[in-house]
Each structure stands twice: as structure tokens, then as C-alpha cells.
Amino acid sequence: MKTPKLILNIADKMGFDVPIDNSQPPPPPPPPKKIYNVPPVKAEIPIPKKSPPEPKTPPPVKEKAVTQVKKSETVKKTVDGAVKVKEYITENLTFLIGGVICILIVLVVAIFAVINWGDMKTRVVKIAEITGEVTIESGARVKPASKNARLSPGDTITLSDDARVRLQIDPDKFLTIEPDTSLYVDYTNIEGMGSVAVNLLYGSVITEMSEEIRAKDSFLVITPNTVIDVRKSVFRTDFEYFGDYGGTPAKITTVENFSGNVNLQLFDDTGEKSENLMILKARNSATLITTPDTALYNGLNVELNLENLPQLTLTEILRVSNSFTPLAYSTIELNDALKLVSERNYQTASSVTLPETTTATPFEPIVVPPETETRISEEEIIIITTTTIPQTIPTTQTLGEMTTYTGEKWWEIANTGTETEVLTTE
């Protein structure tokens, strides 16, 4: 920095030794330039700038590669599956065509069923009345029966020797099942448009049909040696096995017709039809016998004797008659027969002396000494051969009660000589 001149002068006068700067002063600055017509400065309004969108972060290279691999595997599996399907179709084309045909057949049958059976009701088979001990066997299960219990096709119903069941099939068909009987019913589920088959294993059943069977329907009662085809009728069927019938086993079916006509077809021991179809008329009975050697109609259209029927059977037939179902017998005929049978059963039960044992013993051949030979009337024979020997003799016998003698029948006893000829009547 240069020392001012004033200070130098003072320093010189006071005797200080001050260095003198002899350098030239700087030139004066140039005069300012004049500016003419200067335009006013405009204030600029700041324009907001849009922020650029954030760039999407690309997936990592590794995940992208895994996704591509998965897509490739899916495509490969799809292609492999299509190839396998094609191969399966090629190998099983015949079976597939058959399956399609079966499906079409089922559809056609279903459409036909809807058209023809669409307005039909489901068939109901149920117990309308029941007394005594009754069981129903359905498959491997056996259960006690009760009123209003329904039976499925093939269910076996079995009655004890003091039971009775009235089975209803549709609104117009009834089966009165007598004591000591077993049967099962096979049927289609459409009422009035299918078959009903009552298979009688043993015992007796009364069939009541108040309405005629339609043309597309069928009703059969089947025993081990007989088929009974009926359209509208009231009839009784009894079936029994005989271990010794004249030295040979036998199957015997007895049919007793109270109204209309029924068709009977006999079968031999091998299950083949033995003879032509036979017609059983009302007020008649027929006995059909099958042995290992022969099968025959033993008495077709024999006049039915009401007095030989069980009391329970007559009671039921009379009830059917009173329900306005037309029968070939008048109410007077049925009442007279029932009265006679009831009185005979009561008198017989009151006069029989029980043996010491609790079970009945078979009849012994009746032997009458020549000097005291007497004749036995036909009425007494009937009592001997058809009367029940109960274990406990009641003081009174109610109407409709029926028992069955379990001992050896007179026709099962071997003929040992002329001593048994006293059982016949002149």
C-alpha cells in the first residue's frame, strides 16, 4: 500500500526515515456510458414443471427366469396331457362309443318314462292291520313289524302261529296273511304301471283286488310250484311242503276262488312248465301237486265247500263281501258257513282231553274189533282230520280265532292194512 503524501511530509519534518513511493498514480476511470431507451424488465412467472413418472422397477432377472420356466413346464404338461388323451381315445374308441350309446339309451328311456309314467304315483306297500308277533326281514336285518310299516321290494314278512296281517298294495289291493305264513313281495315303484309278485314261501294268503289290473300292469301270486295270474279277483292260496307224500316229497298248492277267474300255471320239480295254462272259475278250487317224478292238476274246478275252510278265512271273506267287493257268494251263504264252522270248532275244543305232555301227539290208526265194529260218520271224520288240539282249552272261543294242528296228518300215515278202512264212509 502506498503511503499518503501528507503522511510523508509530516514524517519528513519529524525526521523519520520513510520510504518514498515515486510510482505514477493510476489513470482515472473512464466516464460511464449513457444508455438510451432501456426497455423495462418484465417479471417472469415461474411455470411449475411436471415431475416425470417414476420408472417401473423391472423384476429381478432371476424371478423372470423362474416365471418363464414355469410357463414352459405348464405348456409342456398341457401338450403331454393332450397327447395322452388322444392316445387314450384312440385305444378305447370302441368303449367310448359304447358308453355314449348307453347314455343315449338311458336318456331315451328317461324321456319315455316321463311321457308315459309322468302322471303316475309311487307304489306303496304297507301294513294296514296287524295282530300277534310279526317280523320283517330286510337284507340281513330282522326287525319287528308294526302298523303302517312299509315294505321294500324283496322284504320277507313272517307271521307266528297266532298272528295276522292285512297288507295294502296301492289303494285297491289287499293281502290278508294268515297265521304261520311267510312271504315276500317284489314290485315296481310305479303304481298301476308295473308288476307285483307275491311270493308265498309257506302258509296261506287271501288276495283281494277290487279294481281290474291295467293292461300294462300285472299281479302274480307265486308258490314254489305254481304261478297264479289274476286281473281282478278274490281268492285264497295255500302252500305246504310234504316230506312224505305217498313215499315221496311233494309241493302242494291249493287255490280257492271266491270271485272272478284266475289263471293257473303248474311247474314241475325242475321249474319247467308242466302243462298248459288252466283257468280256475269262481266258487271252485284246484289242487296242484308237484313231486320229483310228476306234476299234475289234482282236481281242477272242484266245487268249493265253504264249511271246509278255516274260521279265520271265512271271517275275512265275509268282511270283503261287506265292503261291497262283488263275490260269487252271498252274505247269507258266508254267514251260514261261518256259524257252522264256529260251532263245530267250539264243540270240538270243549270235548277234547289234553294229553299229559304239552305238545300234541300224532294220531294213531283207529282199530275197531270186528265184534264191536261201528261206522264213523263223515262229519266225525272232518272233525278228526281238521280240528285243532290246543295246548290250553279255552272255556269260550271268540269269533275269528283259528289254530292249526301240528301233528301228523291222517293222509301222511302209512296204510298198514285194512284196519284203517273204518275211516272211509259208504
Image (spheres, rainbow, N blue to C red):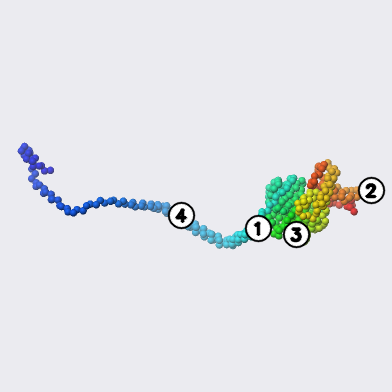
Q: Quadrant of the N terminus?
A: top left
Residue wearing tag 1: 117
Q: Which circle's residue, 2 or 4, is located before the other in the chain?
A: 4
Residue nearest the viewer, comparing 43 with 293: 43
> Decide: marks 3, 4 in contact (CB < 8 A)?
no
Asked which secondary structure carries label 1, the reply is helix
Residue wearing tag 2: 371
Q: Which circle's residue, 1 or 3, is located before the other in the chain?
A: 1
Which quarter of the figure has residue 397?
top right
Which residue is drawn at the image coordinates 72% and 53% (left, top)? Answer: 173
> Decide: marks 4, 1 in contact (CB < 8 A)?
no
Judge the density around disc 3: few (<14), some (14-19), many (≥20) Cα neighbours within 10 Å: few
Residue 136, image x and y in percent? 71, 48
Judge the density around disc 2: few (<14), some (14-19), many (≥20) Cα neighbours within 10 Å: few
Separation of marks 3 and 4 at Cα, in angstroms: 72 Å
> Decide: marks 3, 2 in contact (CB < 8 A)?
no
Amino acid tagged 3: Glu
Which quarter of the figure has residue 262?
bottom right
Amino acid tagged 2: Glu
Residue 70 is marked as 4
Label 2 or label 4, whichever lies nearer to me, is: 2
Residue placed furthest toward the top: 14
Residue wearing tag 3: 272
Q: Which circle's residue, 2 or 1, is located before the other in the chain?
A: 1
> Decide: marks 2, 1 in contact (CB < 8 A)?
no
Left or right position of 46 against 245: left
Kindly tell me whether residue 161 is visible in this rendering.
Answer: yes
